Amino acid sequence: VQTAVELIMNAKAPLIIIGKGASFSRGEKEILEFINKTGIPFLPTPMGKGIVPDSHSLGVAAARSQALADADLVLLFGARLNWILHFGLPPKFNKNVKLIQIDIYPEEHHNNRRADVSLLGHLPLIVSQLQSALPSSYKYPSSSPYLTGLRRKIKENITATEKKFKDDGLPMNYHRAFWEIKKRLPTKDVVFVSEGANTMDIARTIFDVEEPRCRIDAGTFATMGVGMGFAIAAQIHYPNKRVVAIVGDSAFGFSAMEIETAIRAKLPLLIIIINNNGIYQGLGTIEYTATPENQLPSTALLPDVRYELIAEACGGVGFLVKTPDELGQAIDAAFKKDLAGKCVVVNVLIRPGGNQKLEFGWLQTTKPKI
């Protein structure tokens, strides 16, 4: 612990990465207190979101790449150096970065990159020990070049994203659809389930999570088909919260008939299907019908499938939306009293994007060759 303290005090660009191990260990109280007292910025992994509220001023998720590349010390709070964190390797990480790793599982220590300090044990207890061992006068300066640069990058990235929010073209893009949804969701008492490729990754950057253990996605193995089961389980566990599942059309298709389970169990899920007619990317109706069947890409699904009718067939409520106004009206309706207790499916038709660049680099490496 003392060695870790020395590394923290000597670091010019420290960064805390909060993983799902922090969620499993119920470490939100200790981690929030540590961040508030030390002033060290933090970055949550996808399922570490909400341990510290995304609205916290020291959150740097909007400048993720720069935060990782420029950090000279990374504190791993229950986070594993797997593909989600680029295995802790350059060029995403500084080649000279120091690592302090806290994890309860010995087999996770030193994986992919050797930690400079390895602390094995219950995360909340170790975080408290670190805080107690630090001098009470220690506070990472908010005016440091590292934090100043991150704030500048955050502002740039938010400005660029807001331009996509204002795109009035039809069909909608991902960002415009997500903006219409985000504006209407409550900030608390919502559990997010996210599943898909672009759908899951883009949604992660847009929807803030303010409470611990209120976001679940496809996880380390990026397993598709788990979204509906997760949503059902989450609604049973949190009967007083609204479960909102934001899923891609392909991901939804893996377990679509669990809609019947949700309706039979009278679970008031809000399932929002981001429908781009395909896996990763689809084709519009004209392109689809003009392409010979034996030349259709393996990632193409039928255009504009009416997924919302599955909900209606089982006794739920379905909305087909094509415009921002229709989407806003559907989300508003889902939260009104006359639909209380109802399972609602909103089928959002967006741009197929067959000729567009995929949003995240890892999608380029996994996209099937056509």
Image (spheres, grey):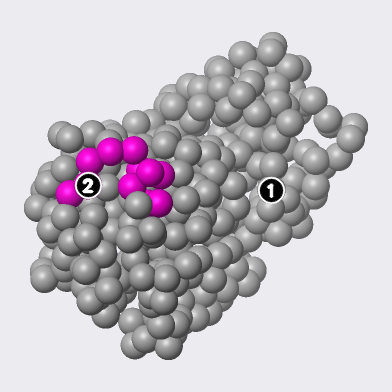
Mark 2 secondary-structure assignment: strand
Q: Position of residue 235 (x, y in %)?
A: 64, 26
Q: Is residue 120 in the magenta section?
A: yes
Quarter of the image for residue 109 reads top left
Q: Position of residue 199 (x, y in %)?
A: 47, 48
Q: Position of residue 294 (x, y in %)?
A: 28, 34
For the point 36% across and 70% down, the residue is: 135
Q: Which one is in front, 313 or 127?
A: 127
Against 35, residue 362 (above or below) is: above
For the point 55% across and 17% down, the residue is: 257
Q: Position of residue 104 (x, y in %)?
A: 27, 36
Residue type at tag 2? Leu
Q: Residues within 10 Å of mark 2 (few under 14, many from 20)?
A: some
Against 325, residue 309 (above or below) is: above
Against 83, residue 17 (above or below) is: below
Q: Which one is in front, 274 or 296?
A: 274
- What whole-number distance in Å separates the C-alpha atoms at marks 2 and 1? 33 Å
Against 245, residue 311 (above or below) is: above
Of the 4 image quadrants, the one containing the C terminus is top left
Q: Is residue 60 left or right of residue 54?
A: left
- Residue 264's label in the rendered image is none
Q: Which one is in front, 115 or 348?
A: 115
Residue 117 seen anywhere in this rendered image of the structure: yes
Residue type at tag 1? Lys
Question: Which residues make up the magenta segment?
Answer: 118-128
For the point 38% across and 31% down, the residue is: 224
- Cβ–Cβ below 8 Å for labels 2 and 1? no
The mark nearer the N terminus, 2 or 1, is 2
Judging by the rendered image, the residue that carries numbered circle 1 is 188
Q: How many marks?
A: 2
- Residue 119's label in the rendered image is 2
Q: Is residue 89 left or right of residue 272?
A: left
